[in-house]
């Protein structure tokens, strides 16, 4: 349910190209959020995040690395029971975790804002790289803003990410969720939680009773509704599922060089990632920086 269903394979008789036959979905989660974000409550967003986590957990439990996780590859639909379904798709670049995915001189494929900084440093893709991408996704769902939407997606951004630059976390985000996001996108992959740990944290945050010392979910949801001018559009069904109504849309404006489609990226190895923001490279390594930029502008 949390992974796109594949019904079979077909072949074009003229080109001889193969194509997978997949279950039809309404749209990408990115398209849905672009149009409907302002009508979602905190509970709505957490429900979506939880479903993505279940899908990623299924992938990782089969010892697979997705390697291109972003909102454009997560699909949204309403089923026959008028309940939402969230499915992870686009497994064209996924690989078993035991295969070496770091090939010297080979271009990197993906969407820059979602890519873990160790990949820019020439390291292999890992499950922890997927967790980094998931952290970016969690913050995007909670904040309503695409990552790095106001800056060009070029080598300057890649360098800043390696030196600890991360998307802004929206004011008012519950502290447990803020800490979860920061753990997911930690520069040290050993500090990133696995999917099971993320799921348990989300369940604890969403469903524990108030008298057990958990977060006051209702109070915070009401605060979010006031901040966003939104109304609750998901209601608990009898079986614990969530039902969604059609909310209004609101357009977003993005920097012209902010690109959110997967593509090959040809860069030299960048510095080892760190958590703290540091732009000393602009002072002590100006020649290196501009050499990188010239190389990137020529090949990207």
Image: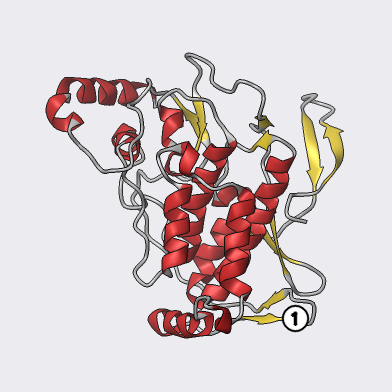
Give the camera-side residue of 191 and 172: 191
Q: Residue furthest left?
A: 283
Relative horizontal placement of residue 203, taking residue 231 as reference (left or right): right
Relative horizontal placement of residue 85, taking residue 31 as reference (left or right): right
Inspect this view and state whether residue 115 appears.
no
Q: Residues within 10 Å of mark 1 (few under 14, many from 20)?
A: few
Against 289, residue 28 (above or below) is below
Residue 80 horizontal/vertical position (percent): 82, 70
Inspect this view and state whether residue 194 appears.
yes
Q: In which quadrant of the rendered image does the N terminus lie? A: bottom right
The number of numbered badges drawn on the structure is: 1
Residue 214 horizontal/vertical position (percent): 53, 76
Q: Residue furthest front?
A: 212
Q: How is the image coloured?
A: secondary structure
Question: Residue 251 occupies which quadrant of the picture?
Answer: bottom left
Q: In which quadrant of the rendered image does the C terminus lie? A: top left
Which residue in the structure is indicated by mark 1?
237
Give the camera-side residue of 84 and 130: 130
Against 161, residue 178 (above or below) is below
Relative horizontal placement of residue 246, taking residue 218 as reference (left or right): right
Residue 252 horizontal/vertical position (percent): 41, 63
Residue at image point 85% right, 27% down? 13
Q: Secondary structure at mark 1?
A: loop
Residue at image point 48% right, 25% down? 123
Residue at image point 56% right, 59% down? 31
Against 124, residue 84 (above or below) is below
Give the camera-side residue of 285 and 219: 219
Residue 127 horizontal/vertical position (percent): 59, 37
Residue at image point 72% right, 42% down? 61
Question: Residue 29 occupies which quadrant of the picture?
Answer: bottom right
């Amino acid at each position: 349910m949390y992974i796109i269903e594949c019904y079979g394979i077909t072949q074009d008789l003229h080109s001889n190209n193969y194509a997978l036959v997949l279950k039809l979905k309404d749209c990408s989660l990115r398209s849905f959020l672009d149009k409907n974000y302002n009508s979602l409550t905190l509970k709505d967003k957490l429900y979506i995040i939880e479903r993505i986590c279940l899908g990623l957990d299924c992938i990782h439990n089969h010892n697979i690395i997705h390697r291109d996780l972003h909102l454009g590859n997560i699909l949204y639909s309403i089923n026959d029971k008028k309940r939402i379904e969230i499915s992870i798709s686009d497994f064209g670049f996924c690989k078993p975790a035991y295969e070496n995915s770091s090939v010297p001189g080979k271009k990197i494929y993906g969407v820059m804002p979602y890519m873990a900084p160790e990949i820019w440093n020439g390291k292999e893709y890992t499950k922890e790289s997927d967790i980094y991408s998931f952290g970016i996704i969690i913050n995007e769902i909670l904040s309503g803003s695409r990552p790095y939407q106001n800056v060009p997606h070029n080598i300057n951004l890649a360098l800043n990410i390696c030196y600890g630059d991360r998307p802004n976390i929206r004011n008012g985000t519950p502290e447990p969720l803020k800490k979860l996001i920061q753990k997911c996108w930690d520069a040290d992959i050993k500090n990133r939680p696995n999917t099971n740990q993320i799921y348990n944290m989300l369940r604890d945050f969403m469903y524990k009773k108030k008298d057990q010392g958990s977060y006051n979910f209702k109070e915070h949801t009401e605060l979010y509704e006031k901040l966003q001018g939104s109304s609750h559009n998901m209601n608990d069904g009898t079986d614990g599922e969530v039902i969604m109504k059609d909310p209004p849309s609101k357009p977003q404006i993005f920097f012209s060089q902010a690109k959110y489609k997967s593509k090959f990226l040809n860069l030299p190895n960048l510095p080892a990632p760190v958590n703290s923001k540091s732009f000393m490279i602009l002072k002590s390594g100006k020649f290196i920086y501009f050499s990188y930029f010239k190389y990137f502008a020529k090949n990207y």
